[in-house]
Amino acid sequence: MIKTHKLVKSYGKGELELIVLKSLDLEITDGEFVAVIGPSGAGKSTLLYQLSLLDEPTSGEVYFDNTKTSAMTQAEKTALRLNKMGYVFQDYALLPELNAVENIALPMLMQGLSFGAAMQKADAALARIGVGDKARNLPSQLSGGQQQRVAIARAIAHNPQILFADEPTANLDSANSRLVLQAFLDLHKDGQTIVMVTHEEEYANQASRVISLKDGFVISDKKRDPPRQYHASLSTRLGRGSL
Amino acid sequence: MKSLRALKKEFLNALRVGWFLAVRQIRRSSKGTTALIIFIMMLTFLNLVAVSGLLVGLIEGSFQQFREGYSGEVIITAAPGKDYIENSPALINFLSSHPRVRAISPRHTLGMQVLGTLTDLPKKNERPNRMGAQITGIDPYKEEDVTRFSRFLKYGENLRPGEEGGILIGANLIKKYSSFADANIPGLDLLQDVDVGSKVRLSATRKNGEVVAKDLIVRGIVKSKVDQVSTRLFVLDSELERFLAVNQEQYQEIALKTDPDYAMALVQETTNFMGSYSARIQTSEQAIPSFLRDVASTFNILGNALSSIALVVASITIFIVIFINAVTKRKFIGIMKGIGISPRAVQFSYVFQTLFYGLMGSAAGLLVTFAALKPFFAAHPIDFPFSDGILVATPEGAVIRAGILLVVTLIAGFMPAKMIVKKNTLDSILGR
C-alpha cells in the first residue's frame, strides 16, 4: 500500500542541516497495524508526516498504491488524504466551532455526500464509539478521551484505506488511552490498516508490527500477532469488535 | 485533465462545504465580536452614504428651499431684454385651466428706492438711510398656495388682502436683522432703525420719467434662506397698482406648483403655447443660479472622494479582521487541509463570513439611514447660513453603495484567507 524508497528528510542547510530521516526503505501492506516507536528526535512523527503526505521529503520517494506521490499536485494530495487516509492527531484537532457529529461529517461532506447522509453516518459512527449521547456537544464540552474518540470516528467514518495516528494517547490518562487503543485493535481486526506513532512501548506491543527508529534509521522491524482485545470494558460497550 | 463537469462539481461541493463551515463559525463565534464587526461595517456604510449625502444635502437643501420658497416647480419670468412676460393673461388662463397645475402665483417685481425712518431724516453731509431693492407685488392667497409665504414672517403680521399702506421687508435689508450686518461690504447700505411699525418711503421712476413716492408702514419682517425672500420688499399687488399703475397684463414672474416629475413636461407645453420669445420658462432646477449647480457638482465630487477613502478604510478593516481571524485559526485551517478539506472550501468559508458581515452591516446601515438619519435631518435640518442641510440618500444610490461595499469587502476578505490557506499544511498544524 505505502512504500518508501531512500526516504530522506532534513531541516536547515549547510552546517545547520539536521537530517531526521536517513534513507529509509519501508513497505506497509494492507491490513497491517504498524506501531512506530523510538526516543524523542528519532524521526517518528516526521516519518508519519511523510507517509501521510502532510510533508514533502528532501529526497527519496513515497509510493501510495504504487503511485509516485512526488509527481502529485497539492490538490491531488489533498484529495488522496480525503479519500484514502484518516488522521488522528495527538491533540485531537477537532474544529472548535463544529459539534461532535459535524466534525465527523465534514470529510464526508467534502467527499460529496449529502448533508443528511453525512450526518446520519456520523451519528452512527459516534454511537458505535460510545459517545452517541455527545453528538451535539462542542469539543469544549467533551473530555479529552471523548474528544479523541470523536477524532477517531472522524478519521475512519469515510472508510479510509489507511489510518494514521500521531501519539493518539499522549494527552490521555491510562483508562482513556486503553479505550483508544482498543478502538484501534477493533479497527485492525476489521481489516483497517493503521500506522501509529507512540512512545509507549506497552501500547506499541499491541500492534502487528513494531518499527523502532533511532537517529533517523530503522533499528528494528518486528512482526507479531497482537492481542485481539486490550480492554474488555470497551469491547463490551461497543457491543461488537469494530467501530 | 479533469473534465469541466468534474471541475464544476468540485467547485459546487467546495461552495457547499464552505457554506457549512461559515454558518457554524458565525453561529458559534463570540456574539460580541460578531456584533463589533457588523457595527464597524455599519459605520463604514454610513460613512459611504451619510457623509456624501450630507455634503450634497447642503446644496440640495438650498435647491429645495428655492423651489418651495420662491420658484415653485416651474417659474416663468420675462424673456431676456423684456420688462414683463408678454401676453400674461392668456398664459395665466392657460395655466389656471391646466389639470396638472396645482397653484399659480403671478408677481409684479420692480426696482425701487426705499428710505427708512422718515422721522430721522439725514442732516447735511450725512448719507440718507436709503437703499435700492426689488419690490414684489403679491396676492397673499395665491402666494400662500405656491410658497406658503406666511411661514417666512418672523416679526409682525402678514399683508391682508384689501388693506392699504402696508409693506413687508426682507430681513437682509434691515441692519437689525440682516445676516450681513456685521460684514463690512463696500456699497452695502442696509436700512437702519427700521422695524415693525416704522414708516418707510418708497420712490420709483415711471417710464415717462416722473418720480413717484409713497409712504408705507412696515407690517412685518420676512426671513428665509432664499435670497428672493430675504432681500425683497413685498406689498399687495393692488398696492403696487395704485402706486405705480402696473399693468395686470404685464407680470414679471409667475411661479407654479405641479408634480415635480411633471415639471419638465409642463415647461415644454407652456413653451409650445407661448413661444420661446415671449417669456423665459424654466423648471426650478433650470432657474437655480449656475454657481449653485457648480457647488453641487463640486460637493458631489468631494463626497465621492470621501466615500472612496471610506471604502479603502473599510477594505483595510475587513482585511485585518479576516486576517486576524484566519491567523488565529491557522492551526485549524491546517488540520482541515490535513484531513482533506480543499483549500478552496476553506477560502469560501471566509468569503461567506465576509459576505455575512458586509450584508448585515449594510442592512443595519440602510435601516439607520432611512429609518433614523433621513427622517431626523428632514425634521431637524442642519442650519447652514445659505441653506437648511438635509441628508440626500436615495434607495437606489444606497443599494449601489451597499453593493460596492460588498464587493470590496469580499475581495478584502478573500485575500487574507487565500494567504493563510496557501501556507504549508504541516507548518500550519504544528504552528511553525
Image (spheres, coloured by chain):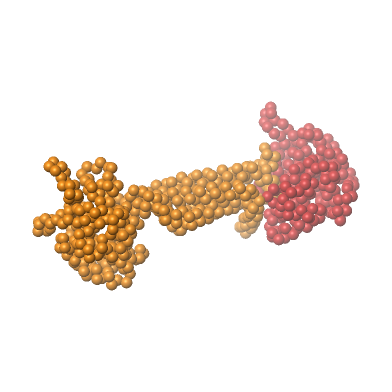
Look at 71% across and 54% down and name the residue there: A102
The percent position of residue B150, horizontal first and vertical second, equals 31, 60
The percent position of residue B85, horizontal first and vertical second, equals 20, 63
The percent position of residue B325, horizontal first and vertical second, equals 61, 45
Quarter of the rendering containing residue B319: top right
Which is more toward the observer, B283 or A223? Answer: B283
Which is more toward the observer, A106 or B308? Answer: B308
Which is more toward the observer, B150 or B327? Answer: B150
- In this rendering, does residue B207 appear at all? yes
Q: Most extreme residue toward the top, as rendered?
A: A15
- Figure check: A220 above or below B214: above
Display colour for chain A? red
- In this rendering, does residue B426 appear at all? no
Question: Would residue B83 be found to the left or right of residue A173 on screen?
Answer: left
Question: Would residue A4 be found to the left or right of residue B362 on screen?
Answer: right
Which is more toward the observer, B418 or B379? Answer: B379
Disc count in the image? 0
Look at 76% across and 53% down and name the residue there: A134
Quarter of the rendering containing residue A35: top right
Question: Would residue B186 be found to the left or right of residue B359 on screen?
Answer: left
The percent position of residue A184, horizontal first and vertical second, equals 83, 48
- Figure check: A198 above or below B377: above
Which chain appears orange? B
On the rendered image, what quadrant is the C terminus of chain B found in? top right
Look at 25% across and 57% down and name the residue there: B219
Look at 83% across and 45% down and name the residue there: A176
